[in-house]
Amino acid sequence: MNPLISVVIPVYNVENYLRQCLDSVINQTYKNLEIICVNDCTADSSDKILEEYARRDSRIIIKKNPKNLGLGLSRNEGIKIAKGKYIHCLDSDDWMALNAYETLLEYFQDDVDAVRFPYISHDEITHKEEYIGYSGEEFLYKKVNIYNTPNCLRVWSPSAWIKIYSRDFIINNSLYYNDYRCLEDIEYSVQSVLKAKNIIFIDTPLLHYRANRKNSLLSQKTGFINNIVKDTISTDKIAQNLPENTKEAILNYIYELLIMNSLDAYYAGRLSFSKMKQLFVENINADILAKTDIFNASNAYKLYLKVIKYTQIKFFLAYNTRRFIKEHFPGFTKKYFEIKKKLLKLI
């Protein structure tokens, strides 16, 4: 019999998106699924939608939390009752390609703990669709881990929904999400990649991600910088006992996340420039961040240097203006890079 796959879907106030998510799972070409929907005390009609779908499809299991636990702990509740050989955590405002689970099963073997796959981003503001993944990596479709291929961390990503894990791997290593209300998946991604015997990275986008959704957790995140700082400190302690190449890779991984999330908070007006500079000085080893031979964090390193070296006014003009134009006037940005490319050819 084909192995059972458990799809864990936390549900909270997603009445406008839940049907598309559920339809993408129940209509998979691979049928041997259990679909565990964790109702995290949703305040809209999402609970009624779950009940409607459960009546139509016996594979749907509804588990209701006694109180609102948040995304990470809700995933844990689903994982605890999952019976599948493989477990995938899917967010309830995203949706899967209809052949996703059939495709993913092709790459699992007994010594493979996780399969990582790319996705298509659908921006709710600009309505732009974009492939978010990787190409040209020499380790694609091969069994790798952080110890024999440290640069695989370049494309590991903290996001839970672009990975499917062996259930035995999760249970045997007690891999559960923390209680953070935002960025709960960073610690999990660090712990899982350090413990994985083998990971396979495939280059087929199998998920559709709804970016910049109004009222999403990411759009409301407050105090999340404290979470990423805590993760950076704990990762630094772990890294000291790792082989040098692995140490540099895992630190660059967490540094890049600290830099990019701090810049998001700064851009949103939730983190001052002086505080951001202080966080970078206190938590980032610049010598390790500069080593791009193991982990290609060149963009994060350039941004780090600008924060360290620029005045507040200069950084505001250089970063905020460019980012605003890039996000709200993508056509101008595209034209700018076209002109820049032509000028570079003339030099």
Image (cartoon, rainbow, N blue to C red):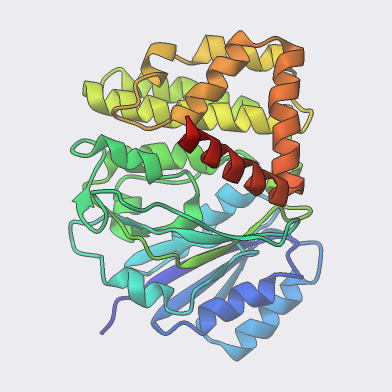
Given residues 254 and 190, the one toward you in this image is 254
Given residues 174 and 2, the one toward you in this image is 2
Instruction: Examine the rendered structure and indicate whether residue 1 appears above or below residue 332.
Output: below
Residue 270 x, y percent position in the rendering = 76, 27
Instruction: Examine the rendered structure and indicate whether residue 86 appears above or below residue 220.
Output: below
Residue 107 x, y percent position in the rendering = 25, 66
Identify the residue shown where x is 72% and y is 78%.
49
Given residues 38 and 148, the one toward you in this image is 148
Identify the residue shown where x is 75% and y is 18%.
272
Instruction: Examine the rendered structure and indicate whether residue 196 appears above or below residue 229.
Output: below
Residue 82 x, y percent position in the rendering = 43, 65
Residue 337 x, y percent position in the rendering = 59, 42
Identify the residue shown where x is 61% and y is 32%.
261
Q: Is residue 252 left or right of residue 38?
A: left
Given residues 112 and 136, the one toward you in this image is 136
Identify the residue shown where x is 31% and y is 42%.
152
Q: Quadrant of the N terminus?
A: bottom left
Instruction: Decide if residue 322 is in sight here.
Output: yes
